Image (cartoon, rainbow, N blue to C red):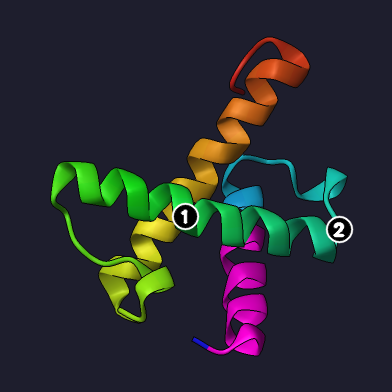
Amino acid sequence: MSIIVWLIVGGIIGWLASKIMRTDAQQGVFLNIVVGIIGAFIGGWIGGMLGVGGDINQGDFSLSGLLMSLVGAIVLLAIVNLFRRGRVR
């Protein structure tokens, strides 16, 4: 994947995850992109362990890859919230 596509998709995935986890007011565009990209790696790892499927990091740009990236970003934000506040939220 092109780096520009990574940034755009990572930003959208990170923004959606921050809306779901209600941390959007604390994050800016840069942090949304970082959460989206790291979430894609986490989602690909979780999906690989469960045999669920797609990972956008390996060029499999599909709906299942996007959903696994979103799940990974949500997991990442839940872990961050757990350490920052002592609860997932």
- In which quadrant of the rendered image does the C terminus lie? top right
Q: Secondary structure at mark 2?
A: loop
Q: Residues within 10 Å of mark 1 (few under 14, many from 20)?
A: many
Q: Amino acid at mark 1?
A: Phe
Locate residue 47, reporting x and y percent. Answer: 26, 50
Which image quadrant for residue 60? bottom left
Which image quadrant for residue 32? bottom right
Residue 88 or 83: which is nearer the viewer? 83
Answer with left or right where residue 15 lies relative to residue 52: right
Answer with left or right where residue 24 lies relative to residue 47: right
- Tell me the distance, in whole angstroms, between the alpha carbons under discs 2 and 1: 20 Å
**65, above or below 88, in the image:** below
Q: Secondary structure at mark 1?
A: helix
Identify the residue shown where x is 85% and y is 43%. 26
Identify the residue shown where x is 48% and y is 59%. 40
Main secondary structure found in the magenta portion: helix
Locate residue 41, reporting x and y percent. Answer: 47, 55
Give the magenta range. 2-16
Q: Which mark is residue 41?
A: 1
Residue under label 2, please give it.
28
Residue 14 or 38: which is nearer the viewer? 38
Q: Amino acid at mark 2?
A: Gly
Asked whether residue 40 is drawn in magenta, I would say no
Locate residue 77, reporting x and y percent. Answer: 62, 38
Residue 3 or 23: which is nearer the viewer? 3
Asked whether residue 5 is drawn in magenta, I would say yes
**27, above or below 37, in the image:** above
